[in-house]
Image: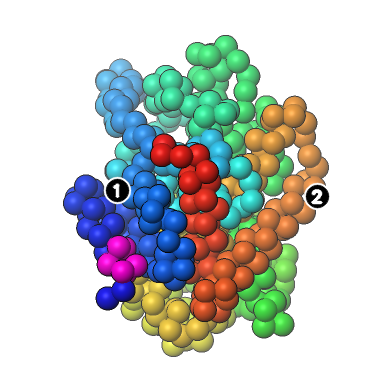
């Protein structure tokens, strides 16, 4: 065992001992650290300055009680969180997730991933993540508003446009951002860019709702271009049916591909005819307005099938875009995708593939874009929204989209070149981890023992 390997194992032992019972966080840290082996072997300064010991430890963890009153006049209590992971290259930046599954393990993994993702965007943003175990599903608008106001009453003490700038994530869309922004403005008596994902009428950016989905497809296009190929004519499977999935389908359609699946927590639909723009408009109304279940799609459109409790990875495809949640592709799912001829996986969700599934993709040498690279478009346009807020300007849709395409191309280039430099050509997992790490690590060294 090399000294670098032994060092990585020591760090992992520390992480597991200090963060017991947090498997998602352990998984995220392991995946990054294993990629860094050649960097640590060639660059001893990272060990000398204890960069790994520091980078796996959040700079700050904030936990708080969130009491709110439901429509029956009863007091409900949830738990709120903010993980301020790393601010070496800019203010903390990362989403807020409202979902019953939210806990410290999930938020630490997301915050850790966010550090490297934000580094790759080329924008000056550190990494953070937060949220609550509150479930907005089935709640009235007034209940969601009362919860958001209570949540922001505490969170407002810890964030700011030059300190920590949250955004949306699962369960936090335009409605929730609006309620939280209003409460922050009321408490602090200032109109400032403290949240991103805002409505275009009051400080938002064009292309922000579309950014994660569009960016994921742009990253796929860049990967395909290395083989003189494109999305055009490709059969694509997409999981999820929320914001990321919707705009992934929209961009694939624009580029001439055909999406045949969507899903939600209840099951998946398969439409061999393809989810065209008319059908996508129905999905957007179903999910964004009526907040219904995806099985209604199969009842609406002839020829579509619904599979209760299933994910879409058994469907034959050329390209797969996991856009739902973490660990939705198991090792068996990955083997099925490869066996069925899938040549590309571009991750719209955060860490949607289990570690064993990632190994399947890497061994098969398919084009595999990990979430911290492929889904960085969302936070990239959040960064562009911050820039517009700071200068009190609004950019056109075309300008933001052009900048998004440039950033996704830059992320692809960084990952591709880092992988090649360290003897792993074509390995976007290692390339993204290394490129994201080096920028943050060097900045941490520059700033001393903090």
Q: Which residue is mark 1?
A: 105
Query: Left or right: where does residue 215 sit relative to residue 43?
Result: right
Q: Which quarter of the image is occupied by the C terminus?
A: top left
Total numbered labels: 2
Query: Around disc 1, counting alpha carbons within 10 Å, would you say few (fewer than 14), some (14 to 19), or many (20 or more)?
Result: some
Residue situated in front as seen by the camera: 291 or 231: 231
Residue 175 percent across, percent down from the top left: 53, 33
The residue lying at 50 percent from left, 32 percent from top is 164
Q: Which residue is mark 2?
A: 398
Q: CA separation, marks 1 and 2?
A: 38 Å
How many residues crowd mark 2 within 10 Å: few (<14), some (14–19), many (20+)?
A: few
- Please name whichever residue, 226 or 15, is drawn nearer the observer in this view of the structure: 15
Magenta span: predominant SS is helix
Q: Position of residue 425 (x, y in %)?
A: 55, 79
Q: Residue at x 34, y 67 (%)?
A: 4
**Image vertical order of residue 339 relative to residue 14, above or below:** below
Q: Residue at x 42, y 46 (%)?
A: 111
Q: Is residue 133 magenta?
A: no
- Looking at the rendered structure, the secondary structure element under dot 1 is helix
Q: Does residue 450 sit above or below 16 in this rendering? A: above
Residue in front for this viewpoint, 440 or 168: 440
Residue 252 drawn above or below residue 208:
below
Residue 267, relative to residue 360: is it above or below?
A: above
> Where residue 89 appears, x then y in whole percent?
55, 42
Q: Secondary structure at mark 2?
A: helix
The residue shown at (31%, 31%) is 63
Give the camera-side residue of 241 and 409: 409
Residue 317: tell me if it is visible: no
What range is drawn magenta here? 3-8
Residue 253 visible to an observer of this rendering: yes
**Earlier residue among tags 1 and 2:** 1
Looking at the rendered image, the disc whose residue lies closer to the viewer, 1 or 2, is 1
């Amino acid at each position: 065992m090399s000294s670098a390997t032994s060092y990585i194992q020591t760090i992992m032992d520390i992480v597991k001992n200090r963060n017991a019972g947090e498997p998602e966080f352990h998984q995220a840290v392991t995946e990054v650290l294993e990629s860094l082996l050649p960097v640590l072997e060639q660059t001893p300064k990272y060990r000398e300055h204890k960069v790994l010991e520091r980078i796996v430890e959040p700079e700050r963890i904030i936990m708080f009680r969130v009491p709110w009153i439901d429509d029956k006049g009863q007091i409900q209590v949830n738990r709120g969180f903010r993980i301020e992971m790393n601010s070496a290259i800019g203010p903390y930046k990362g989403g807020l997730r409202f979902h019953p599954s939210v806990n410290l393990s999930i938020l630490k993994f997301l915050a850790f991933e966010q550090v490297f993702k934000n580094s790759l965007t080329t924008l000056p943003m550190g990494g953070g993540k937060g949220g609550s175990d509150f479930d907005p599903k089935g709640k009235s608008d007034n209940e969601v508003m009362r919860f958001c106001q209570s949540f922001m009453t505490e969170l407002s003490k810890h964030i700011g446009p030059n300190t920590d700038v949250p955004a949306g994530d699962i369960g936090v869309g335009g409605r929730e951002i609006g309620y939280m922004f209003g409460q922050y403005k009321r408490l602090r008596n200032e109109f400032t860019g403290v949240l991103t994902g805002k409505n275009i009428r009051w400080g938002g950016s064009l292309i922000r709702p579309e950014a994660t989905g569009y960016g994921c497809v742009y990253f796929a296009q860049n990967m395909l271009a290395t083989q003189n190929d494109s999305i055009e004519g490709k059969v694509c499977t997409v999981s999820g049916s929320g914001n990321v999935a919707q705009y992934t389908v929209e961009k694939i359609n624009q580029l001439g591909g055909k999406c045949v699946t969507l899903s939600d927590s209840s099951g998946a639909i398969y439409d061999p005819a393809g989810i065209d723009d008319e059908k996508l408009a129905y999905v957007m109304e179903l999910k964004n307005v009526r907040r219904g279940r995806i099985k209604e799609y199969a009842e609406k459109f002839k020829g579509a099938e619904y599979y209760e409790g299933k994910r879409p990875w058994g469907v034959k495809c050329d390209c797969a875009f996991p856009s739902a949640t973490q660990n939705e592709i198991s090792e068996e799912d990955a083997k099925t995708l490869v066996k069925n001829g899938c040549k590309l996986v571009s991750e719209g969700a955060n860490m949607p593939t289990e570690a064993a599934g990632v190994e399947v993709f890497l061994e098969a040498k398919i084009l595999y874009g990990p979430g911290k690279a492929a889904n960085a478009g969302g936070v990239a346009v959040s960064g562009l929204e911050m820039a517009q807020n700071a200068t009190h300007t609004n950019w056109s849709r075309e300008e933001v989209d052009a900048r998004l395409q440039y950033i996704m191309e830059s992320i692809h280039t960084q990952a591709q070149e880092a992988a090649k430099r360290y003897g792993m050509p074509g390995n976007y997992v290692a390339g993204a981890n290394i490129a994201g790490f080096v920028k943050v690590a060097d900045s941490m060294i520059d700033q001393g023992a903090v």
